[in-house]
Image (spheres, rainbow, N blue to C red):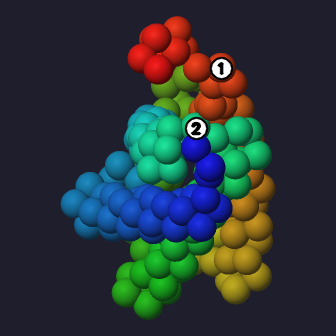
Amino acid sequence: MDLSLQNLNKAASTNGITIGILSTAIGVVTFYMFPSLLGSISFGIATLIISLVIYVFFTLDLRKKIGGFWNFREALKGIFLMAFIAGLLYSVVNFAFYKFVEPNAYDKISGYMEAGMTNTLENIGMDQDQIDEAISKQSEGIKAQYDPSPMQFFKNIGIAVIVQFVMSLIFAAIFKKEEPVFASIDEEEQE
């Protein structure tokens, strides 16, 4: 099958928009319904796993939409475009949401984060000085995420693009599927 770049771009863009909307919806629902989870390390790990499952599903869907076969280069292009659009949409909507709709989100989330992290670090036996240092570093990261300056916003997008590209390289290597060079025996017998 001749892969149409236009079909790949269109399908990757559509899937990217869908992932961006899903990610944003999960974030907003969590913020309003379960804000205490935002400070939990296990919720962060669960979110990472859910995100990977979503990306795997939409990567396989993308490959299916363009005919079921793509080489590494085509897979990388499609997966990266999908991830880039999803990440950009998520970042822009989150920035607008936390800047204009919920401008005090950082204060709310940092309280949950400090309580959850303190509890976790105390349970593993860290002393109070180490806990305070770890919370201070984490608090800076939370501020950059939920109340970023314009410069931090663009820095966050730059970091996200690098992470998306590396993820896309890995996914392209895993999910590439070359079209068979020779027809199978069953196809030859039918001719």
Q: Earlier in the sequence, mark 2 or mark 1?
A: 2
Question: Pointer 1: what residue?
Answer: 182
Which residue is depicted at the point 45% across and 50% down?
65
Residue 175 vs 24, above or below: the answer is above
Which amino acid is tagged 1? Phe
- Describe the element under mark 1 as helix, strand or loop: loop
Q: Residues within 10 Å of mark 1 (few under 14, many from 20)?
A: few
Residue 105 placement (x, y as % from top left): 43, 74
The quadrant of the picture occupied by the N terminus is: top right
Q: Is residue 93 visible?
A: yes
Question: Pointer 2: what residue?
Answer: 69
Q: Is residue 20 visible?
A: no
**Is residue 72 left or right of 139 when viewed as pictured?**
right
Residue 37 vs 49, above or below: the answer is below
Residue 189 placement (x, y as % from top left): 46, 11
Which residue is depicted at the point 66% across and 45% down?
75
Furthest-left residue in this view:
33
